[in-house]
Amino acid sequence: MTSKASSVPYTSLPSRPDSYPQNVIVLSYYHRPPNHILRRCLLFTTAILLLSASVYLLYPSDPAIQLSRIKLNHIRVNYSPELTLDASFSLTIKVENRDFFSLYYDSLVVSVGYRGRELGFVNSRGGKIRARRSSYVGCKA
């Protein structure tokens, strides 16, 4: 038991109540309703970005063809019926596949020209180029 001399901290009630009564309202935590418009916008944006990336990566593009080496085999001058020059070349053509999948081709036909005039055609047999790689094709013109 406690003695009378021990002090118990307390506050006394006010002798005169305030003229305005004090009311306390306890509110529970307010959960905001989910924002469906924001969720739909994020899903739509994500879907558009994924679709754009897949189209960019999977849409087939044309292979790049570049003449990498040319070698002169022989030159012949013909006098009859008119003056003509026959030249034979060995060509090495670089075919570059920019796609993310392999490329199979049946034949390669390249037109050879000089100063805007067509000199001839080059035909080569088919082959395969692996994804994001290049291949060298040898042919004669």
Image: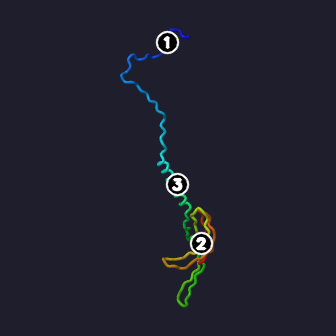
Q: Dividing the picture into quarters, in which one does residue 109 lie?
A: bottom right
Which quarter of the figure is the N terminus placed in?
top right
Residue at the (53%, 55%) spot, across then down: 50
Residue toward you, 30 or 139? 30
Q: Position of residue 130 (x, y in %)?
A: 62, 64
Mark 3 vs 2: CB contact within 8 A: no
In primary-sequence order, the first of circles 1 and 3 is: 1
Q: Dividing the picture into quarters, in which one does residue 139 lie?
A: bottom right
Residue at the (48%, 35%) spot, across then down: 29
Find the residue positioned furthest to the bottom.
Answer: 81
Identity, as a three-letter code, of the amino acid under mark 1: Ser
**Label 2, on which residue?**
92
**Label 3, on which residue?**
47
Residue toward you, 70 or 133? 133
Colour convention: rainbow
Secondary structure beneath label 2: strand
Which quarter of the figure is the C terminus placed in?
bottom right
**Label 1, on which residue?**
7
Classify 10 Å Cα crowding around label 2: few (below 14), some (14-19), many (20 and above): some
Secondary structure beneath label 3: helix
Secondary structure beneath label 1: loop
Alpha carbon distance from label 1 to label 2: 107 Å
Identity, as a three-letter code, of the amino acid under mark 2: Thr
Alpha carbon distance from label 1 to label 3: 71 Å
In primary-sequence order, the first of circles 1 and 2 is: 1
Residue at the (49%, 50%) spot, across then down: 40
Residue 88 lies, with reference to residue 56, above or below; the image says: below
Residue 65 lies, with reference to residue 30, above or below; the image says: below
Classify 10 Å Cα crowding around label 3: few (below 14), some (14-19), many (20 and above): few
